[in-house]
Image (spheres, grey):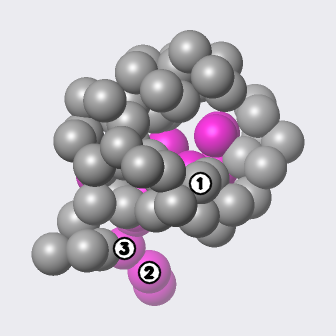
């Protein structure tokens, strides 16, 4: 039995369904953005790509955590 997904990754299925792009594509956009600060990236995803705050925040948090 697998444990339920928790944290930012729990949003991934609904992000893919709602916005029609795979998570890896969103993460690549975040990694290649000239922006580096969490809230700058969240604002960028919201304004340029139409993501909701929770979805943008989850993607940025998960992607930046991978850098650390």
In the image, residue 28 sits, relative to residue 36, either above or below, namely below
Outermost residue to the right: 20
- Looking at marks 1 and 2 on the same chain, the residue that comes earlier in the sequence is marked by 2
Q: Is mark 1 in CB contact (under 8 Å) with mark 3?
A: no
Q: Kindly report the distance in space between the C-alpha atoms of the residues bearing marks 1 and 2.
A: 30 Å
Query: Is the residue 12 above or below the residue 19 in the image?
Result: below
Residue placed most toward the observer, 17 or 49: 49
Name the residue furthest front.
34
Q: Read off the residue under disc 1.
A: 29
Whether label 3 touches label 2, CB < 8 Å: yes
The kind of secondary structure the magenta stretch mainly shows is helix
Residue linked to disc 3: 3
- Image vertical order of residue 34 relative to residue 68, above or below: above
The local secondary structure at tag 2 comes to: loop
Percent position (x, y) of residue 51?
A: 59, 23
Q: Can residue 10 be seen in this view?
A: no
Q: Which residue is drawn at 64% across and 39% down?
A: 14
- Nearer to me, 55 or 11: 55
User: On the rendered image, what quadrant is the C terminus found in?
Assistant: bottom left
Q: Give the range drawn in magenta.
A: 1-15
Q: Quadrant of residue 57?
A: top left
On screen, residue 49 above or below 38: above
Question: To which quarter of the image does residue 58 belong?
Answer: top left
Q: Mark 2 points at which residue?
A: 2
Image location of residue 66, percent across then percent down:
29, 74
- Label 1, label 3: how far apart the Cα atoms are: 29 Å
Determine if residue 7 is in view. yes
Query: Is residue 63 or residue 15 the one in the foreground?
Result: 63
Estimate the x, y position of residue 45 in percent, counting from the top left. Answer: 53, 30
In magenta stretch: residue 3: yes
User: Residue at 46% of width from left, 84% of height from top?
Assistant: 1
Label for residue 56? none
């Amino acid at each position: 039995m697998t444990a339920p997904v928790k944290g930012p990754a729990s949003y991934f299925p609904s992000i893919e369904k709602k916005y029609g792009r795979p998570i890896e594509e969103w993460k690549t956009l975040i990694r290649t953005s000239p922006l580096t600060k969490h809230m700058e990236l969240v604002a960028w995803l919201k304004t340029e790509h139409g993501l909701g705050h929770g979805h943008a925040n989850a993607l940025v948090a998960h992607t930046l955590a991978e850098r650390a």
